[in-house]
Structures are given as structure tokens and as C-alpha cells.
Image: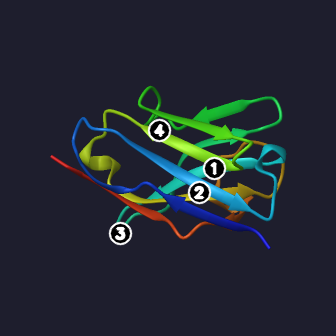
Amino acid sequence: QVQLVESGGGLVQAGGSLRLSCAASGRTISLYVMGWFRQAPGKEREFVACTRGIGGITYHADSVKGRFTVSSDNAKNTVYLQMNSLKPEDTAVYYCALAKGLSTSDNANDYEEWGQGTQVTVSS
């Protein structure tokens, strides 16, 4: 059984930083595509970034490019999302997810396992 557990969310002022973690069990993440999504109140779930262990590929949404960085620690079976220069519009619940296949994707339908989410709130 796959379990994804996010942590690291919280309240931060605009311009600040947070690092989210997603600890995985039941699967070896280096063999899969792992993604980060977010959902703000009243909005649809939005792709943030993903990484594929095979080939070391990363992909970031334009809205976070240059500010957020996805990475992984295979020894810890954990994926991270380093978030810098945070803005109030980054406020959302952030979810990590494990993809069905080996292709990187920004489509939530291509992911089959999800964590419970962690709240990130950025104050202005």
C-alpha cells in the first residue's frame, strides 16, 4: 500500500521561504514520477512541479519557475518542494502525488496516489 505524507507547510510572510517534504512508503520513488499540486479555496487543483528519478528530469509550472524547486532524496524516499520568494497567491493546500506512468505530466488525472495535503499560507 502506497502512503504519501506531506509536511512543512505553515504561515509565512510574503518574500519568505518554506520547504515541503513528501515522505513515501510502499513504492520506491526513484522509479516513478512524483508531482506537486496545489489547490486554493474555490479553485481547481493546479500543477506546481514534478520530478522523475529516471533521468533526473524536473518540470515546473510557469507560475513558480525560478522561485520553486522540486528535488528528491532517494535514500530517504522523499520528495521536496523548496519554495522561495513566496507570494500571497501561493496560498493553497499543497499535495504530493505519484504518477501512473513514467512520463512527466501536469495533469492531475495522470496521478494515482495522493497525500493528505499541507496548508501553505502567505501573508502580505
Quarter of the picture containing the N terminus is: bottom right
Look at the numbered discs 2 and 3 and tell me whether their residues touch, using CB distance below 8 Å.
no
- Packing grade of label 4 (10 A; few <14, some 14-19, many >=20) is some
Q: Which mark is residue 35?
A: 1
Alpha carbon of mark 4 to alpha carbon of mark 1: how far?
13 Å
Look at the numbered discs 4 and 3 and tell me whether their residues touch, using CB distance below 8 Å.
no
Q: Position of residue 76 (x, y in %)?
A: 69, 47
Q: Quadrant of residue 18?
A: top left
User: In the picture provided, is 56 more to the left or to the right than 13?
Assistant: right
- Packing grade of label 1 (10 A; few <14, some 14-19, many >=20) is many
- Disc 3 marks which amino acid? Gly
Alpha carbon of mark 2 to alpha carbon of mark 1: how far?
6 Å
* Callout in the foreground (1, 3): 1
Q: Which mark is residue 82?
A: 4
Q: Could you tell which of marks 1 and 3 lies nearer the N-terminus? A: 1
- Packing grade of label 3 (10 A; few <14, some 14-19, many >=20) is few
Reply above or below: 50 against 24. Answer: above
Look at the numbered discs 4 and 1 and tell me whether their residues touch, using CB distance below 8 Å.
no
* Callout in the foreground (2, 4): 4
Residue extending furthest toward the top: 66
Look at the numbered discs 2 and 1 and tell me whether their residues touch, using CB distance below 8 Å.
yes
Alpha carbon of mark 2 to alpha carbon of mark 4: how far?
13 Å
Q: Position of residue 12 (x, y in %)?
A: 25, 48
Q: Position of residue 47 (x, y in %)?
A: 54, 49
Q: Secondary structure at mark 4?
A: strand
Alpha carbon of mark 2 to alpha carbon of mark 3: how far?
19 Å
- Disc 2 marks which amino acid? Cys
